[in-house]
Image (cartoon, coloured by chain):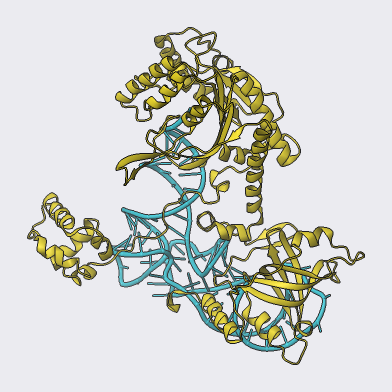
Chain colours: A yellow, B cyan
RNA sequence: GACUCAGUAGCUCAGCUGGUAGAGCACGUCCCUUUUAAGGAUGGGGUCCAGGGUUCGAAUCCCUGCUGGGUCACCA
């Protein structure tokens, strides 16, 4: 990179880097740096009367500086927070040579640099716990300028807020916005709390394939990729359900997985193309047991994070204290529309939808219409955690039919703050029924439903060997983290949310193309046909370019001579 | 995908009905030995997202595109 591309401040920092080296100071030393205290230790445990922390060795980033001639204060930030550090010229430079203070500390170090310090803890005149430096070491030089965020009395000034930069350069966000780290610490705690609970009960944490030949276990559009050696398509998993159930067939009584799933669908505040789901399957249980289990789990998570169960989510206060209300889908619809859909046929339901102004398609079956009514009229009312149970059979091809009503399934979703958080079944373990349900999905697929499930013959085969009665549950970890930490965007609970590539397509002028031999009359059309840069043009085979450009000429009826293949080939030479 | 708002210095932002770019922090130089959004003096720093158009003249108006945010649609 030439200095021409750098800002003034970046050039100054690079010069400082060279100057450090010329003074015999390596800005990126190899040796480890011994640390015996962190900033949190000092803040919480330093007591001047006890005279502790009198020989500390600490390390971190310089986050601010207040230089007053021969004395200076900096703020040093490590993983645990910040502490004030005092530098005094004559304490650092014991002899006549004051270079280490005047030049190295004052001039060559910058905000963002990592340093190590040795010294002792003390309290300043204004009463702030600080470290008195006897010796410091440059540990890593920062060449880019961090955003400067200042704070006074809990009020933040000049906060680093540009969401694009915060997500693209999360490392900067984490360095300068102290509250961001907290969300991710809580996310880890949520996962650990769940994992501990499962392990205590003897369930086994497992890993199942992410690359799957058949994307099963959910209805969603998958990402597709290609395996070269096998010369076959593979899909990134949309769910891991069918693999976990195979393990129940294999004889494990409880298995769970924290899994990244991938869905090739729209992105918004609550959807990212890759997201984390926890799925758990327990043998010899049903969905009633799973509801008890789920509410116990969520109460534990809330307690572990906050010490209580009442959380503010948006404008609502949501209480995760068990037990949660349990409501069948039919009763929920009755409660919010006054209509009892029990026993209605397709025609009657269609009329109900019309009366309720719920938009439905001609192709919708009973199940889908009921689901639409619920989605439109009920879902957003479910603020407190509520188990919605007994979904129509058409919507749930992997779920066992209801013990009292074959049109329904033993399924529940847990709704919180008007959104789905968990999804669970008494799992379908009748292989003949399962095959029929897959075949129904195939019919939907033939009708053009691109999200209908594929038939997984091996999964049916596994069921034929016998799967014990089992209940399974899935919970969206990103969404749970949003609820538990009060974030309203999924991007704020993912370190690296999906973004479009940031490199802008550089547009070159026709003269750049003429320079590589493109005829003058063609130059602007080459750009118009989509080859906006010479580099882009050269990414293609000359035969392809030739075809495409003559195609463009024909389509737009250009009154110029068609291109010859050998002519195009000459453009490609570097 | 639709609508809508935004993009100006490293960061946060001003910039009027079009007249050729500003502040605070940060940075350079100088002063300052317990400060804390340290302070004082002084100076430098810009492809005003990109491309086109209107105009004598565009950061500003118009068009197209790029990127991001919000709302909606899609999404068990």
User: Looking at the image, which is closer to me, A313 or A467?
Assistant: A467
- Is A564 drawn above or below residue B3 in the view shown? below
Q: Position of residue A335 (x, y in %)?
A: 59, 16
- Is A263 drawn above or below residue B17 in the view shown? above
Residue at image location 31% in from the left, 27% down from the top: A448
User: Looking at the image, which is closer to me, A244 or A81?
Assistant: A244
Looking at the figure, which quarter contains the N terminus of chain A? bottom left
User: Residue A303 appears in which quarter of the rendering?
Assistant: top right
- Is residue A354 visible in the rendered image? The answer is no
Is A292 positioned to the left or the right of A440 in the image? right
User: Residue B39 appears in which quarter of the rendering?
Assistant: bottom right
Q: Position of residue A171 (x, y in %)?
A: 56, 59
Q: Position of residue A375 (x, y in %)?
A: 50, 25
Is B55 positioned to the left or the right of A489 in the image? left
- Is A85 drawn above or below residue A314 in the view shown? below
- Is A420 drawn above or below residue A169 in the view shown? above
Q: How many marks?
A: 0
User: Looking at the image, which is closer to me, A3 or A573?
Assistant: A573
Residue at image location 56% in from the left, 77% down from the top: A13
Q: Position of residue A144 (x, y in %)?
A: 54, 70
Single out the residue that lies furthest toward the bottom: A96
């Amino acid at each position: 990179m030439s200095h021409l591309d750098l800002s003034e401040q970046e050039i100054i920092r690079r010069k400082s880097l060279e100057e450090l080296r010329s003074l015999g100071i390596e800005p990126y030393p190899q040796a480890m740096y011994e640390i015996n205290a962190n900033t949190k230790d000092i803040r919480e445990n330093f007591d001047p009367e006890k005279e502790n922390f009198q020989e500390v060795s600490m390390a971190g980033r310089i986050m601010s500086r207040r230089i007053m001639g021969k004395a200076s204060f900096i703020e040093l930030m490590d993983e645990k927070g910040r502490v004030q550090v005092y530098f005094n010229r004559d304490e650092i430079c014991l002899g006549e040579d004051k270079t280490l203070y005047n030049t190295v500390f004052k001039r060559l170090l910058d905000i963002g640099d990592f340093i190590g310090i040795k010294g002792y803890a003390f309290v300043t005149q204004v009463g702030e716990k600080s470290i008195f430096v006897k010796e410091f070491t440059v540990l890593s030089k920062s060449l880019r300028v961090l955003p400067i965020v200042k704070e006074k009395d809990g009020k933040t000034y000049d906060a680093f807020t540009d969401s694009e930069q915060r997500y693209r350069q999360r490392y900067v966000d984490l360095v300068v916005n102290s509250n961001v780290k907290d969300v991710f610490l809580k996310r880890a705690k949520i996962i650990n709390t769940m994992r501990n609970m499962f392990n205590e009960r003897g369930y086994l944490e497992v890993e199942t394939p992410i690359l799957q030949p058949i994307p099963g276990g959910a209805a969603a559009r998958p990402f597709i990729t290609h395996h070269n050696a096998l010369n076959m398509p593979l899909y990134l998993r949309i769910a891991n359900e069918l693999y976990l159930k195979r393990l129940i067939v294999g004889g494990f009584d409880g298995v769970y997985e924290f899994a990244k799933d991938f869905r090739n669908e729209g992105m918004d505040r609550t959807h990212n193309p890759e997201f984390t789901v926890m799925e758990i399957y327990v043998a010899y249980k049903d969905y009633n047991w799973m509801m008890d289990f789920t509410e116990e789990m969520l109460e534990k998570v809330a307690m572990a994070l906050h010490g209580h169960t009442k959380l503010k989510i948006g404008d609502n206060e949501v209480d995760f204290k068990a037990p949660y209300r349990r409501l069948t889908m039919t009763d929920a619809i009755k409660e919010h529309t006054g209509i009892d859909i029990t026993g209605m046929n397709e025609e009657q339901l269609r009329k109900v939808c019309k009366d309720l102004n719920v938009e439905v398609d001609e192709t919708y079956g009973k199940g889908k219409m009921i689901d639409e009514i619920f989605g439109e009229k009920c879902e957003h009312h479910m603020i407190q955690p509520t188990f919605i149970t007994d979904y129509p059979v058409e919507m749930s091809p992997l779920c066992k039919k209801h013990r009292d009503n074959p049109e329904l399934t033993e399924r529940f979703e847990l709704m919180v703050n008007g959104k789905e958080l968990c999804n669970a079944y008494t799992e379908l373990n009748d292989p003949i029924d399962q095959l029929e349900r897959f075949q129904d999905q195939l019919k939907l697929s033939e009708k053009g439903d691109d999200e209908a499930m594929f038939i997984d013959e091996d999964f049916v085969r596994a069921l034929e060997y016998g799967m014990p009665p089992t209940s399974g549950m899935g919970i969206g970890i990103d969404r749970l983290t949003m609820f538990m930490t009060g974030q309203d965007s999924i991007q704020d609970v993912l370190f690296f949310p999906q973004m479009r590539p940031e490199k802008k397509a550089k547009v070159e002028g026709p003269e750049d193309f003429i320079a590589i031999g493109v005829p003058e009359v063609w130059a602007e059309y080459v750009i118009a046909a989509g080859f906006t840069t010479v580099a882009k043009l050269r990414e293609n085979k000359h035969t392809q370019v030739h075809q495409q450009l003559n195609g463009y000429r024909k389509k737009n009826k250009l009154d110029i001579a068609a291109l010859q293949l050998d002519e195009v080939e000459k453009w490609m030479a570097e």
